[in-house]
Amino acid sequence: MGLFDFQYDVALCQCPICSHQVKPITCGFNNCSWKMVGTKVDNSGGAMKYDSGWRVVGNKFIYFDDQNESKMATYTRLQIFTKVTASEPDECSVCLYKLNTKATLTTPCNHVFHEECVVNWAEAHKTCPECHEPLSIRNELQNKFFCKKKWKKIRVGRMYFAPSLTLFLLFALCCTYLLSEQCVSSSSISILGSHPSKKRSSPINPSNVVGSKLTLDGSTLTYFQEKILPIVVQEIKTTKIQDISQEVDTPIGHVYLYGSNIQIQTFNVNGLTVKIAPNQGISIYLQDGAIQMTMNWRYKEKSFPHVSDSGTADIRVSVAVSMLLQVTLDPIKSIPVVTVTQVQANINSFDLKLHGGASWLYNVFISAFSNSIKSAIKDAIQQQIPATVNEQVSQLIAQLSFVMPLPAPLNTSHIAVDYRASEIHFDAQNYMTFGTQGTFIDMDHQIEPYPTAPSEMPDRVTSQPLNIFISDYVFNSASYMCYAKQLFKFVVTNAMLPSTVPVKLNTLYFKYILPQLYTKYPNMDMQIVLEASSAPRFALSTKSGVDLLVDVEAQFQVITNNQTSPVTTQEVFTFDLLAELDASVSLLNSTTLALNFTYVQSKFSVKDSQVGPINVQWFDTLLRWTVEYFLVPFVNQYGKAGVPIPTVQQFTLVKPSILYGDGYVAISTDFTLNPSKR
């Protein structure tokens, strides 16, 4: 039901069997009211308006009779309007039982069925049982609306996996740039149904927002091993061991025994275990560290004649070292703080060989030196490693970038995404989760961040090593900031119209539907200014994936002087456009997320007019083209550019899967680690 314009909609006519484009010859009607409106040529060659008036067709099929109706070839403009007849059906055409026996549902094409019947029918056939218009069920019919949907999804637990999307990851997410000002609700959206999701309490503190999550299981600790182990090894190799001295009874009497210049020459790790310590952090256990050391030794007899001697020593030690990397959150800077605690060193084996001097005293000296050297090694490791490693790790974290600027075309807008940490926890099931803010911020500090809290997200949805979550908050935060920066505005001119559009932006093309416009501005070029009237709103759900709802004002202007720069214009009328777009999510690379939008449907209404009353149906096709040919590509220039996501640069994602939940999108993936160059 609606409008068919023979000037604009001919390209939409397809054969129902082969889908090839066909030229319409006549129209047929069934169970509806219809009328024909147009401008036809009379016998003298002049133009004459024609309106057939509404005609009612019952449960039968009729078509134009060329002998009784004026032939279409005599019309310079012809439109066919249809609407549902006033009489209500008394039975469901699916089950053929009376409608008043069960709850009913009215489709956008204005046909009434039992809700249960039409839901089952639409799931199986995807079309209206009466007129065969495309239908799909959305959000369990929460707002009882049907719309076109082309997503192919496979159920995975509570999620749906889009098999055609082979790459992805964090969010950090771009039309992430085009996300929303406010959470989607049934009261603010008439096309999309609301997506129910748990919300955190508002107002919100940006530092407490968990807009995205990064969950790693124990296998990902190779990254920490790659980063932390060299620091630990280097620190043990450079550990300074204090000189030792003691008094010893020997066969030659009481002597002073000294060990000096004790140095570690080599340190090799033969076994290392890194695992998650629940509610604490990361535990590191070095089972067997082989240390080779050298030392100078000497002795001096305590009494006269003070006999003395000296030499060198080689020491081989096997040491086991355990420590805990305690990870907490700096409440001021909102960054992770890693502290090395609980360092324990134990000597597994010890071998001391002395060289030079009185060899017949070696056994006495080895026995005396052994305990002192062991204690010195343990004390040095346990005291020096925490301080040095803490400093090194702090420097490593300081080099990480938590606030990321956006890629082109938004790199000049002074917008960045803040991925500073907002929560950290370590689970007993051997995985760790880092919650990040995911807030788009104004680098000029003039615009406050998006004020609405994000949806709740799980820590994991699959058992793969890496799970990344981007909530609706991230998308909506991006959209909110871009809207506040006034980035959603552009102008459509004649030069931009594709050759497939049989219309020009000139008052001549509106001569017969808006004669008052043509009378006031005869044969003058026009332009359309499209500007978002609110931040585009994103909705993420298990069933529908990613949807975007865009409110746009389409202001039609007459160009009164094209010799100036910018051109001089006069506003003549404005439409409110509500467009629903569908989004497919993909990964540009392991650190960038992109969205590609496609047109689903739109609604239009007249906002104001300077040239008298306007029937929006006359402009339906033109406005739809405006959305498809201009609004969607405009949105896609941001979506396809991509946005950084919260991950680690050294991670290369392996076979990532994209899944959708209520209020978030998730990436489940394996990965390989590319060691950083030192």
Image (tube, grey):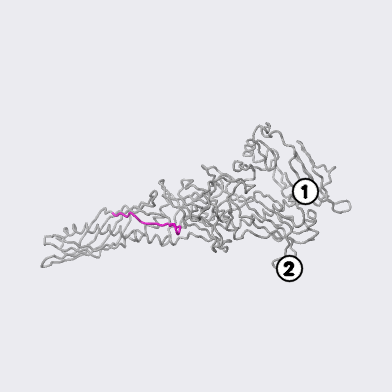
Q: Which label number is shown at residue 563?
A: 2
Query: Nearer the N terminus, badge 1 or badge 2?
Result: 1
Main SS, magenta residues: strand
Position of 528 with respect to 150 (left or right) is right
Is 311 in front, or is 240? Answer: 240
Residue sitting farthest toward the right: 44
Q: Is residue 134 visible?
A: yes
Q: Amino acid at mark 2?
A: Gln
Crowd band around label 1 with a 10 angstrom C-alpha radius: few (<14), some (14–19), many (20+) = many
Residue 450 drawn at (x, y percent): 55, 55
Vertical arrangement, residue 388 with respect to residue 139, above or below: below
Q: Quadrant of residue 66?
A: top right
The N terminus sits in image quarter: top right
Q: Quadrant of residue 441?
A: bottom right
- Tell me the tag on residue 40: none
The quarter of the rendered structure image containing the C terminus is bottom left
The residue tagged 1 is 79
- For label 2, count other residues whose C-alpha is less than 10 Å away and answer few (under 14), some (14-19) or many (20+): few
Residue stretch in magenta: 330-345
